[in-house]
Every structure is written in structure tokens, then in C-alpha cells.
């Protein structure tokens, strides 16, 4: 069995104020940046690749633009790779969220629900892990069109971490908007 690859592509910039918490909010991405990202990656992708996209508009539009350029790539939407739900923080500026709320979340990073009624990191990681484990058990390469949080979760999963013990373990540098990386699964 040869090495398999999972391409991870982040959506283009969203149409929103800078510094907005928008995790599970279904915001649109900039159309021109979406088109440009699709054109850049479409040239690089191998034929017949399985494409999995978050159902949120900012990812679905990018996956659709790729499929329009590459009819050999069939897109499926999967809610398991949607961004984390930040609960009551959704739609607020990160700077407007009370410091005490953020501190409480990071103090019990794995199990405190973000924004009081959003997802915990453990629940989010388990959701993404379901899709990641399915890809690992499969046969082929794939492209995921997803979000910064999902791509960070995959980097942890790929390194063998199912859930970070604390906030310091969470990857701090996201991929740029419209950027991609490839993780490789070596044969056992």
C-alpha cells in the first residue's frame, strides 16, 4: 500500500468585521478570493480525488468552485468538518468577550463549553476525529475544504493527540485563508 495524502484547504476570508468570533455562523467568503483559491489548488490536485467540504457557505462555495474547474472531483458535504460552535460568543468581537469567560474556558479547555452553550474542545475533536478516522480507514487520498479550527484539530489528530489536555497544546498558527497543507499517512 502506498502513502496516502489528505489535502487540507482553508476557506477564503469571510465577509465580516475583523476580530469577529464566527465559528459555526454561516458567513459567506469573499467571492474573488474564493475563485482565486480554487484556481490555485485545482491545478495541484490529483485526478479523481474525494472532496469533503464543510456545509457552511464559506467552504461550500470554495468546494463548488473547485468542482466547476475539476469535474472529475465529486464534492460531499459533511457537518463533522464544520467549524467549532462558540455558543453565545458567535457574532461577537473576540475583544468584547469577558476576560473571565475566556479564562474559565481555557482553564478547563477540554471540557468547558465555549460561550456557555457551544461545543467543548473534546466534543469538537471527537466530531472531527470521526471524519479523520474514516479517511484513515479508507483507501484513497482526499481533500477537505474546511476551517482553521478543523485544520488545527487534524494536526493534533495526525500527531496522535485525541484531545489537548490544556489550551497551550492547541496549535496557535492557522493556515492562511485559501491556503492548504497536506498530511501523509504512511502504510503500516
Image (cartoon, rainbow, N blue to C red):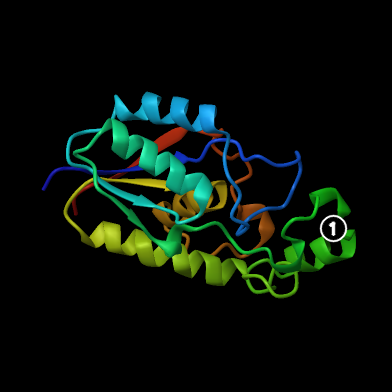
Does residue 8 appear in the picture of this structure?
no
Secondary structure of the residue carrying tag 1 is loop
- Please determine whether, in this image, residue 21 is positioned above or below residue 101: above
- Please determine whether, in this image, residue 157 is positioned above or below residue 147: below
- Please determine whether, in this image, residue 107 is positioned above or below residue 12: below
Around disc 1, counting alpha carbons within 10 Å, would you say few (fewer than 14), some (14 to 19), or many (20 or more)?
A: some
**Location of residue 100 in the rendering, given as x and y in whole percent from the top left corner:** 88, 64
Q: Quadrant of residue 89?
A: bottom right
Is 42 or 159 nearer to us in this picture? Answer: 42
**Location of residue 50 in the rendering, given as x and y in whole percent from the top left corner:** 24, 48
Is 156 or 135 nearer to us in this picture? Answer: 135
**Location of residue 74 in the rendering, given as x and y in whole percent from the top left corner:** 24, 47
Number of numbered discs: 1
Q: Which residue is mark 1?
A: 97
Residue at point 21% right, 33% down?
Answer: 46
Is 29 or 95 nearer to us in this picture? Answer: 29
Residue at point 23% right, 62% down?
Answer: 137
**Location of residue 57 in the rendering, given as x and y in whole percent from the top left corner:** 51, 50
Is 112 left, or right, of 136 in this rendering?
right
Is 47 or 185 nearer to us in this picture? Answer: 47
Residue at point 43% right, 40% down?
Answer: 62
Quadrant containing the C terminus in the rendered view: bottom left
- Please determine whether, in this image, residue 28 is positioned above or below residue 42: below
Does residue 104 appear in the picture of this structure?
yes
Residue at point 50% right, 58% down?
Answer: 82
**Residue reaching furthest left?**
1
Is 159 left, or right, of 91 in this rendering?
left
Amino acid at each position: 500500500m502506498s502513502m496516502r495524502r489528505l489535502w487540507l484547504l482553508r476557506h477564503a476570508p469571510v465577509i465580516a468585521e475583523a476580530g469577529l468570533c464566527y465559528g459555526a455562523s454561516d458567513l459567506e467568503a469573499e467571492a474573488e478570493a474564493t475563485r482565486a483559491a480554487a484556481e490555485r489548488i485545482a491545478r495541484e490536485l490529483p485526478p479523481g480525488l474525494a472532496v469533503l467540504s464543510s456545509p457552511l457557505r464559506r467552504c461550500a462555495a470554495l468546494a463548488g468552485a473547485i468542482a466547476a474547474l475539476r469535474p472529475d472531483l465529486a464534492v460531499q458535504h459533511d457537518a463533522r468538518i464544520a467549524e467549532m460552535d462558540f455558543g453565545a460568543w458567535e457574532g461577537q468581537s473576540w475583544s468584547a468577550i469577558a476576560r473571565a469567560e475566556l479564562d474559565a474556558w481555557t482553564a478547563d479547555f477540554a471540557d468547558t463549553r465555549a460561550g456557555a452553550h457551544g461545543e467543548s474542545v473534546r466534543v469538537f475533536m471527537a466530531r472531527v476525529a470521526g471524519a479523520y478516522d474514516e479517511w484513515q480507514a479508507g483507501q484513497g487520498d482526499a481533500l477537505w475544504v474546511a476551517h482553521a479550527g478543523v485544520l488545527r484539530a487534524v494536526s493534533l489528530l495526525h500527531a496522535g493527540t485525541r484531545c489537548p489536555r490544556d489550551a497551550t497544546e492547541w496549535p496557535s498558527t492557522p493556515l492562511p485563508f485559501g491556503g492548504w497543507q497536506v498530511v501523509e499517512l504512511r502504510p503500516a
